[in-house]
Amino acid sequence: MDYKLISTYLDYCKTHKRLSSHTIRAYKNDLMQFYNSDYDNVESYIEQLTRSNIKTNTLRRKIACMKVFYNYLKYQNIIEET
């Protein structure tokens, strides 16, 4: 994953989805946490999050963030359907 993709996605969320600055900040933190992790794939990362001691709502938001980000990448033809 490339930081530029994250930045472009967050700009898209601001301008097209009109998400709040709080949501944008949370999404940025979630995506950067994955970007800076040692995990090779989203499934391993989510599995680790599930085992961690984070609140259920936080876990759900992190999973949703990854899902919509990858849907955006597919929509933009940056990645293929897997």
Image (tube, helix red, strand yellow):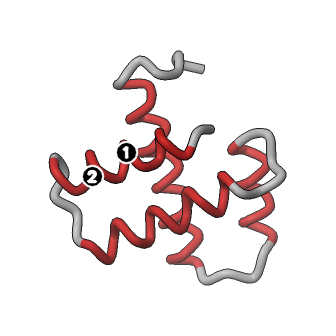
| Circles 2, 1 touching at the beta carbon (< 8 Å) | yes
Q: Amino acid at mark 2?
A: Cys
Among the 4 quarters of the image, the one containing residue 24: bottom left
> Dot 2: few (<14), some (14–19), or many (≥20) neighbours within 10 Å?
some
Q: Which mark is residue 60?
A: none
Give the vertical position of 74 relative to 15 (above or below): above
Farthest residue in the front direction? 4
- Whether residue 61 sits left or right of residue 43 in the image: it is left
* Count of all numbered marks drawn on residues in the image: 2
Give the vertical position of 78 relative to 11 (above or below): above
Mark 2 to mark 1 CA distance (whole Å): 6 Å
Give the structural element (helix, strand or loop) at label 1.
helix
Q: Which residue is mark 1?
A: 9
Residue 57, x across and y down, in percent: 50, 77
Q: Which mark is residue 13?
A: 2
- Whether residue 12 sits left or right of residue 77 in the image: it is left
**Which is more toward the observer, 57 or 35?**
35
Give the structural element (helix, strand or loop) at label 2.
helix
Quadrant containing the C terminus is top right
Quadrant containing the N terminus is top right
Residue 8, x across and y down, in percent: 37, 43
Identify which residue is drawn at 80% across, 61% down. 48
Q: Amino acid at mark 1?
A: Tyr
Residue 25, x across and y down, in percent: 40, 71
**Which is more toward the observer, 47 or 21?**
21
- Whether residue 52 sits left or right of residue 7 in the image: it is right
Identify which residue is drawn at 74% across, 40% down. 41
Identify which residue is drawn at 47% across, 22% down. 78
> Dot 1: few (<14), some (14–19), or many (≥20) neighbours within 10 Å?
many
**Which is more toward the observer, 77 or 65?**
77
